Image (cartoon, rainbow, N blue to C red):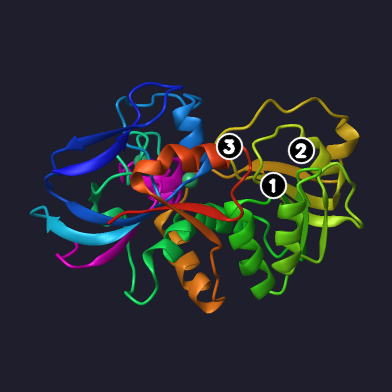
Amino acid sequence: MMRAMVLEKPGTELRLVEASEPAPKDHQVVIKVQACAVCRTDLHIVDGELPDIRYPVIPGHQVVGEVTAVGASAELTVGARVGVAWLGWTCGECEYCASERENLCDRARFNGYHVDGGYAGYMLADSRYCFSLDSSEPAEQIAPLLCGGLIGYRCLRLTGDAEKVGIYGFGSAAHLITQAAIHQGREIYAFTRPGDTAAAAFAGELGAAWVGGSDQAAPEPLDAAIIFAPVGALVPKALKDLKKGGSVICGGIHMSDIPGFPYADLWGEREIRSVANLTRRDGNEFLKLARDAKITAQIQTYALEDANAALAALRTGAITGTAVLVID
Ligand SMILES: [Zn+2]
Ligand SMILES: [Zn+2]
């Protein structure tokens, strides 16, 4: 038997249940979960803001653990240390999968959303979508890299060689990707929620070249902007902060509506783009970069049964860095 935190219907608290340990089939493995980081997407799932959520569901898609059982065709062995991210499975045959864009696969299944995730003692995962990890770093340090870091990396990658990069919303993804960007020689301009002095101080400590409120104009025109806050009004705001040819990258899976804005603000070959999910290539590239850049996650740890408290703290902005469930 194992313990798990289950979402039974939208808008409710997760409930602690005892369930039987899953059994692996075909390419699947069973992972004994050591740590699972908490993501804003988990809040969107709890609030029922994403389509086609399967209920009941165990959330969690930033999992570090050890393989304890393998299916007949699994590509991992018992004892392997692995990370599990958002992308749980893709079809492998559609036009997107065939062109290194598996993140856009229409049939993709996501962990902690379409299939049970890591807010549990054990989880099932497809071995082909697990990331191999070395055993030296603590699980709670690696878990935040697996969504905030990884999606943040895909956003950063889509800014091309932008030197001056604005980041709007300074939470889990931002604090990790700021370290990566500075390691790559870029300058970070951090826009935090007006009045959020803790987030502003945190951005400064991490080496941001400039820190200000999201209601302030950039001190000079930026090459690119990445928006992590789920606030559509930041899109036209960020567009105004850009040089010609610059791009606004929207990193969230859900955002409030984007208000209208003058075409003149988009003129000059500025562009607005979303980032959807991740590919396995993103994951492998980012995990290597994280080691080279010695990225350190600032974490606040919770026990599995305190997942509701972790989600509530994330919702109110009370988490500096990333909340992580540590599971024994
Ligand atoms: Zn996530
Ligand atoms: Zn596909």
The answer to whether mark 2 is within 8 Å of ligand 1 is: no
Which residue in the structure is indicated by mark 1?
A: 169
Marks 1 and 2: CB-CB under 8 Å?
A: yes
Q: Secondary structure at mark 2?
A: helix
Which residue is at 63% across, 32% downward? Answer: 255
Q: Residue at x 31, y 31 (%)?
A: 57
Residue 84 location (% of width, % of height) = 34, 54
Say whether disc 3 or disc 1 marks the residue closer to the N-terminus.
1
| Position of the C terminus by quadrant | bottom left
State the separation of the CA atoms marked 1 and 2.
Answer: 10 Å
The percent coordinates of residue 146 (x first, y second) are: 44, 56
The mark that comes first in sequence, 3 or 2, is 2
| x 66%, y 63%: residue | 178
Q: Which residue is mark 3?
A: 315
The reply, left or right, for residue 235 in relation to residue 320 is right
Mark 2: which amino acid?
Leu
- The quarter of the rendered structure image containing the N terminus is top left
Check the image and report above or below for 132 versus 71. Answer: below
The residue that disc 2 covers is 234
Q: Please state which of residues 320 and 182 is positioned toward the viewer in this rendering.
A: 320
Label 1 secondary element: loop
The amino acid marked with disc number 3 is: Arg
